[in-house]
Amino acid sequence: RKDEDSLPLKVAAQQALASLAARGFCRPTKSYEPPQDVEPRLQEICKDALGGNLDASSWKTAALSEPLVKYKLLTRCIKEFKHDIPNSCLMNITSVADLLDYLTTPVQGTSPYDQLVHRARVPPNLHAVAEPVRFHPETDTFFNGVSAFPGSSTIVTGLKAKKKFRGFTANPKWPFV
């Protein structure tokens, strides 16, 4: 089969996944340190969600092919372990073993850019700015509060950006007119 652009569906899906992976580079994530008893707790959740007929030796190989069962199992795991599962990982979890691998993997809460900036040894040809530099007339010392764009306000949109940056509303009149 082919899609509208006459590309095979598999190629189109791979391109979409590559696009998602490229966009997710600097997204902030919540840190997660797996508890020591992940395996027994997951085994109990699987017994409840998948039915009590699971063997103690083969419970990890149980497939999660039915969507409703997978949904119930994953929501129970999210509540139990307080660790969300992003959409990009849902398609990779096809069995209980995959879920166990996901739940035993620690997650650092910092973005790769922050890790690079705060690394002790950085390559000599790399300069990364840890804190962004924004012009604000009250805090500017280099130009004595005179903006390169007089009459232009610094508008900060977005909730996360407002935590980092401070905006200001400029005087609409030109300073020397």
Image (tube, rainbow, N blue to C red):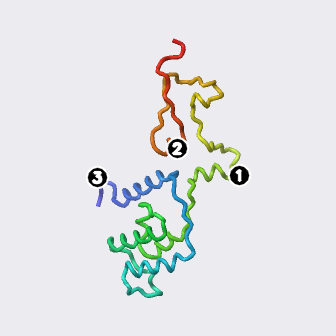
Q: Residue at x 50, y 80 (%)?
A: 40
Q: Secondary structure at mark 1?
A: loop
Q: Residue at x 33, y 59 (%)?
A: 9
Q: Which residue is mark 3?
A: 4
Name, please, the residue furthest toward the top: 177
In the depicted structure, whether residue 78 falls above or below residue 18: below
In the depicted structure, whether residue 87 falls above or below residue 67: above
Q: Secondary structure at mark 3?
A: loop
Badge 3: residue crowd in 10 Å (few <14, some 14–19, many ≥20):
few
> How many marks do you count on the picture?
3
- Upstream in the sequence, badge 3 or badge 1? 3
- From the image, state whether disc 3 or disc 1 is nearer to you: 1
Q: Is residue 29 left or right of residue 95?
A: right
Measured from the top left, where is residue 67 in percent x and y? 33, 71
Amino acid, disc 1: Arg
Q: Secondary structure at mark 2?
A: helix
Amino acid, disc 3: Glu
Give residue 126's quadrant in the image: top right
- Upstream in the sequence, badge 1 or badge 2? 1
Mark 1 touches mark 2? (CB < 8 Å): no
